[in-house]
Image (cartoon, grey):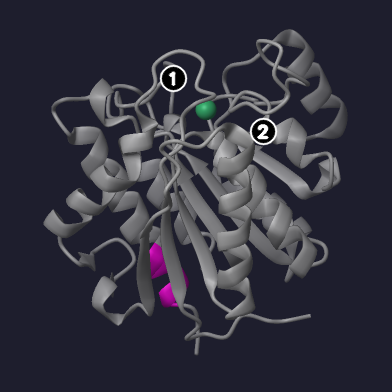
Amino acid sequence: MSVPKSRQEIVLFGCPHDISSSYRVGSRLGPAAIRHSLNEIEDYSPYLEGDLRDVHFSDAGDLGLANKNTGDALNLIKETTEKILEEDKIPFALGGNHLITLPVLQVINKKYKNIKILYLDAHCDLREEYLGNKLSHATVAKRLLDFVSPESLFQFGIRSGERKEFEFAGRHKIIYKFSRKSLTEVLKKIGNSPLYITMDLDVFDPGIFPGTGVPEPGGISFEEFIEFIKGLKKTRIVGLDVVELSPPCDPTEISSFLAATVVREMLILIGKRKK
Ligand SMILES: [Mn+2]
């Protein structure tokens, strides 16, 4: 099994796909908005005390998904992830809607056995199908369970879904309270296993992050997010994504700046792993 090295390159790539979004589309514009804001904010993070300029990463740009149907879009995301892994780099996908997580993890799951998934989101995403569709941003967690066991999926920030989804999550102990205490419990279960982080930005409270397709009240604060990722310093992150920024939903651009800050923190978190 390939173990990530401390100076392993992280490759950002945009997946501007939102065809399956159920309500407000626009997350296809997410990657471009994140890049734009990332350019504007400071490189230095006073939270993690690290600098983007010390992180070994590159940006592969956006995949050409604009005219592709869902199947073709997912295949192109898969092929791209395969190439990044072949070069022994860490894929960091920018959404797009949450469905883009599926092809990335399908590929990662083939390379790394015993993959664990941290799933930050407002929504369970545990429906078998949504609006007659098995491949949807509202079913993506369920699709992951087609090839990963429920004991390997850890959801945080969840506050919206059908009764059936919460019952399923309860039976399999998938949902955890958003706190350092729960995270510590989960990190014990994860141990040194390869870890994938999928971050649906709607986990944040819509008061600070209105720029998303399906906002849910009662979300986390930025400070809670920072405390959370500080707890991840010793984990073995092998891939990640940040999804569901929909720039048209927030003309003030506050959401884009928050999303870019999240991406900066994630890059620094991985870049700062002990040498
Ligand atoms: Mn969501």
Mark 2 Cβ and ligand 1 under 8 Å apart: no
Q: Indicate the secondary structure of the residue bearing disc 2.
A: helix
Along the polypeptide, which appears first: circle 2 or circle 1? 2
* Residue found at x 54% / y 70%: 90
* Residue found at x 43% / y 29%: 202
Q: Which residue is mark 2?
A: 140
Q: Amino acid at mark 1?
A: Gly
Badge 1: how crowded within 10 Å, few (<14), some, or many (20+)? some
Query: Is 199 drawn above or below residue 5 in the view shown?
Result: above
* Tag shown at residue 204: none
Which x, y percent locates residue 223? Answer: 34, 44
Query: Is 261 drawn above or below residue 248 in the view shown?
Result: below
Q: Which residues are magenta?
A: 267-272
Q: Amino acid at mark 2?
A: Val
Secondary structure that dominates the magenta span: helix
Q: Indicate the secondary structure of the residue bearing disc 1.
A: loop
Which x, y percent locates residue 172? Answer: 85, 33
Q: Residue furthest bottom?
A: 275
Residue 193 quadrant: bottom right
Q: Is residue 149 visible?
A: yes
Q: Which residue is mark 1?
A: 218
Query: Is 133 drawn above or below residue 231 in the view shown?
Result: above
Q: Quick check: is 128 in the magenta stretch? A: no
State left or right for residue 159 relative to residue 128: left
* Residue found at x 62% / y 23%: 138
